[in-house]
Image: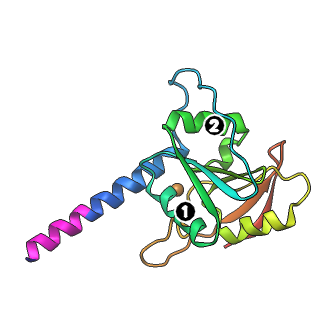
Amino acid sequence: MELRNTSAALALVGILTMGLAACGGSADAETADYEAPQPVAEANVSAETLVVYKTETCGCCGEWVDHMAENGFEVEVHDMSQEELGALKTARGIDRGLQSCHTAEIGGYLVEGHVPAKDLQRLLAEKPDGVKGIAVPGMPIGSPGMEAEDGHVDEYEVVTFDDAGETKVYAWY
Ligand SMILES: [Cu+2]
C-alpha cells in the first residue's frame, strides 16, 4: 500500500516536472533553426472571447486558461507547435523581452503570459490610449497558473505595451 502511494506520488512529480519543463522551454525556444514561419491564420478577435494560443503540453498555460474561465472569460484554446507559436508572437510583434509561454487575444488586445484576470478586466474597461497589449513577461512563480505549493509569490509586474514596444507598469505583485 505504502509502495503504491509512493509510486503514485513519484508519477505525479514526474508529470508536474514535465509540465513545468514544457513551460520553461517556451520563452527561450530556439528560433534560429526551424524553417521559415508559416503564415498564421488571422486571429478570431472579438470582445467576448479570449482566444488563447499555446502548445498542447504546456501545463501552466492550461492552469492560466482555467483561471481566466473561473473569472468569467469565455475562452477558446488553439493548441499549436512551438514553432507556430513563436511565429505567431513574431507576427503579432511581441518583443522577445515580453514573451512568455502563451499568447492570447481579446477585444483587439494582445495578452502575453500569466496576466491576472482582474488586470485584463481593468484594461478592457479602461481601454487606455495607444495600448496594444498587456503582458507578464517570463513565468513568475505565484502568477495565475504558476502558483507554488508553498504559496510563494515572486515579485512581478504586469505591463502594457504599445506598437513601438514601449512598456508601462500597469500593476505589480
Ligand atoms: Cu506558463
Residue located beneath label 1 in the image? 64
The prevailing secondary structure element of the residues shown in magenta is helix
Where does residue 7 sit, x and y in percent of width and height?
Answer: 16, 66
Amino acid on which disc 2 is placed: Leu
Mark drawn on residue 114: none
Tell me the element at label 1: helix
Q: Residue at x 35, y 53 (%)?
A: 18
Q: Give the side of residue 163 with respect to residue 138, left or right.
A: right
Amino acid on which disc 1 is placed: Trp
The C terminus sits in image quarter? bottom right
* Colouring scheme, one of rainbow, by chain, secondary structure, one colour: rainbow
Place residue 75 in its image quadrant.
Answer: bottom right
State the extent of the magenta-drawn residues as a range.
2-11
Of residues 136 and 74, the one nearer the viewer is 74
Above or below residue 145? Residue 111 is: above
Q: Give the side of residue 47 with respect to residue 54, left or right.
A: right
User: What distance separates the C-alpha of mark 1 from that of mark 2?
Assistant: 19 Å
Where does residue 131 sit, x and y in percent of width and height?
Answer: 84, 53
Residue located beneath label 2 in the image? 88
Q: Give the side of residue 119 with respect to residue 54, left or right.
A: right
Q: Residue at x 64, y 65 (%)?
A: 73
Q: Residues within 10 Å of mark 2 (few under 14, many from 20)?
A: many
Of residues 22 and 169, the one nearer the viewer is 22
